[in-house]
């Protein structure tokens, strides 16, 4: 049985939780491979809305085991809070249900303080991070001085490592950023307590996953963030510090190429972005209000992690073609088709124009996306409410044409379309 991978094909927030929920029903293990509590995965089951940041959202299926892979950066405090929150919603997370990689890195209060101080110093040039300490934790990893989950296993050594880490961070905070230092011993005590509670969950997850796959079990790789936030292949420097693209799953879980089955790219039928950076098809005014929603509903375009209103715009096909290429997508899942119903005319971006030249492929490079003007195709849209549609043939003809255009332009077949936030509001390709 293979490793199926679900990735975001845009700038994150594509509604991956929907597809994870569908695939998790058939999977024995659901594994996250990168990022940390910067992610926000929402799954609605009946009256209950699950908002998860760290634990793979597949955990809400009681038959699954969750894995947090070596590519992740984990804040033990938010992890424990998330476990407690899940428990109140009826999902217990004992060690039999969650394995945390020895080699995942830890996020500490010092990483959060550095994230805030660095963003403040960037001023107008800020990245717009989630302030969860993600970047500074990956910096420590790359600099080979990071704290790993495995360090929680030895109490005496842990105290020493935390002291050295916080002392070094305090030096940066006070000398480079004129920020307040952290109370070193308070962090040590905090982490000793976290360690005591998390120890039973720590494992060699690469071996665990290999054995499961060899045993014929189905494993689901649950992507966080999105392709365009990838450190190498995203819209640098407005990216996160990990690898949300599909190849990141192998690196971040300790698996080889032969494991891979389907690679499903999830994309909204329009475009959104949180944080700074170029966004050629961005809209404002009434179109933006319509696409974003008011914020009253859990599915409106406001950040799950930060609550920030998301930037919104028309679907950008050069970006989607790019995502298909760097992920090796085998299928597309489209989300939020219902939001486009009743729009008085729509647009879709087929290419970019700059300096008299037309670009069909994403010209990522030294110039930012700000320098490109979208070449749009205008569409009339459809009036029908699609929220009750469950069969492909019942979608309005104009909606099916829109989907065909996306398939033709991206080169990837569409397998599913979501028409609302509920589990059953999903139309599978017959
Ligand atoms: P960081 O990951 O907190 O360092 O933030 C870097 C950039 O990635 C910022 O533009 C964030 O808004 C964006 N980002 C990080 N995680 C997510 C996510 O889960 N969804 C959408 N954007 C994200």
Image (cartoon, rainbow, N blue to C red):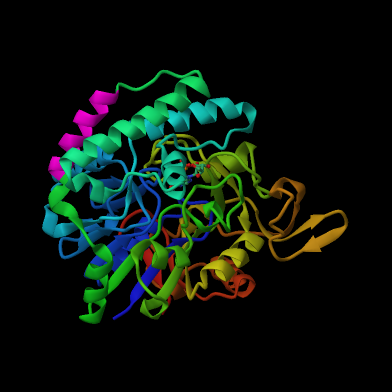
| Position of the C terminus by quadrant | bottom left
Nearest to the observer: residue 18 or residue 33: 33
Nearest to the observer: residue 332 or residue 125: 125
Work out which residue is located at the far right of the displayed protein and give it. Answer: 356
Residue 190 colored in magenta in the image? yes
- Picture quadrant where residue 262 is located: bottom left
Residue located at (61% from left, 39% from top): 286
Locate residue 71, reporting x and y percent. Answer: 38, 56
147 in relation to 338, above or below: above
Residue located at (35% from left, 71% from top): 255
Locate residue 84, reporting x and y percent. Answer: 17, 40
Locate residue 169, reporting x and y percent. Answer: 41, 30
Residue located at (34% from left, 22% from top): 182
Nearest to the observer: residue 162 or residue 316: 162
Give, as a single range, the part of the protein colored magenta: 184-197
- Picture quadrant where residue 290 is located: top right
Locate residue 263, reporting x and y percent. Answer: 44, 72
Residue 254 colored in magenta in the image? no
Give the number of marks: 0
- Picture quadrant where residue 213 is located: bottom left
| 296 relative to 44 in the view: left or right | right
Q: Main secondary structure of the magenta part?
A: helix
Whether residue 93 is visible to the viewer of this picture, yes or no, is no
Whether residue 416 is visible to the viewer of this picture, yes or no, is yes
Nearest to the observer: residue 40 or residue 184: 184
């Amino acid at each position: 049985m293979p490793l199926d991978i679900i990735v975001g094909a845009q700038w994150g927030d594509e509604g991956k939780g929907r597809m994870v929920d569908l695939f998790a029903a058939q999977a024995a293990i659901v594994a996250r491979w990168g990022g940390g509590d910067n992610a926000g995965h929402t799954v609605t089951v009946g009256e209950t809305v699950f908002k998860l940041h760290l634990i793979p959202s597949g955990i809400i299926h009681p038959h699954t085991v969750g894995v947090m892979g070596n590519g992740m950066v984990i804040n033990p405090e938010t992890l424990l809070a998330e476990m407690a929150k899940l428990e109140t919603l009826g999902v217990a997370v004992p060690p039999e249900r969650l394995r945390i990689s020895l080699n995942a890195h830890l996020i500490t209060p010092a990483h959060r303080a550095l994230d805030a101080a660095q963003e403040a110093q960037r001023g107008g040039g800020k990245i717009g991070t989630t302030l969860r300490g993600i970047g500074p934790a990956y910096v420590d990893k790359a600099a080979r001085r990071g704290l790993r989950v495995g360090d929680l296993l030895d109490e005496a050594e842990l105290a020493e490592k935390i002291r050295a880490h916080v002392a070094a961070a305090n030096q940066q905070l006070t000398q480079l950023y004129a920020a307040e230092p952290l109370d070193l011993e308070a962090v040590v005590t905090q982490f000793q307590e976290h360690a005591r509670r998390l120890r039973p969950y720590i494992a060699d997850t690469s071996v665990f996953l290999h054995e499961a796959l060899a045993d014929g079990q189905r494993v689901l790789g649950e992507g966080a963030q999105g392709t365009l936030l990838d450190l190498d292949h995203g819209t640098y420097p407005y990216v996160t510090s990990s690898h949300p693209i599909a190849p990141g799953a192998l690196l971040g879980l300790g698996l080889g190429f032969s494991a891979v089955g389907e690679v499903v790219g999830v994309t909204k039928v329009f475009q959104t972005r949180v944080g700074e950076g170029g966004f050629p098809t961005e809209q404002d005014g009434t179109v933006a209000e319509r696409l974003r929603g008011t914020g009253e509903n859990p599915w409106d375009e406001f950040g799950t992690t930060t609550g920030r209103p998301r930037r919104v715009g028309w679907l950008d096909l050069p970006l989607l073609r790019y995502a298909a290429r760097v992920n090796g997508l085998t299928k597309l899942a489209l989300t939020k088709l219902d939001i486009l119903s009743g729009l008085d005319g729509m647009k879709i971006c087929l290419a970019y124009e700059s300096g008299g030249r037309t670009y069909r492929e994403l010209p990522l490079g030294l110039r930012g996306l700000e320098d490109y003007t979208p070449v749009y195709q205008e569409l009339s849209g459809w009036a029908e409410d699609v929220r009750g549609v469950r069969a492909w043939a019942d979608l309005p003809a104009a909606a099916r044409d829109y989907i065909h255009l996306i398939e033709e332009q991206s080169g990837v077949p569409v397998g599913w379309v979501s028409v609302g936030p509920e589990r059953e509001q999903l139309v599978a390709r017959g």
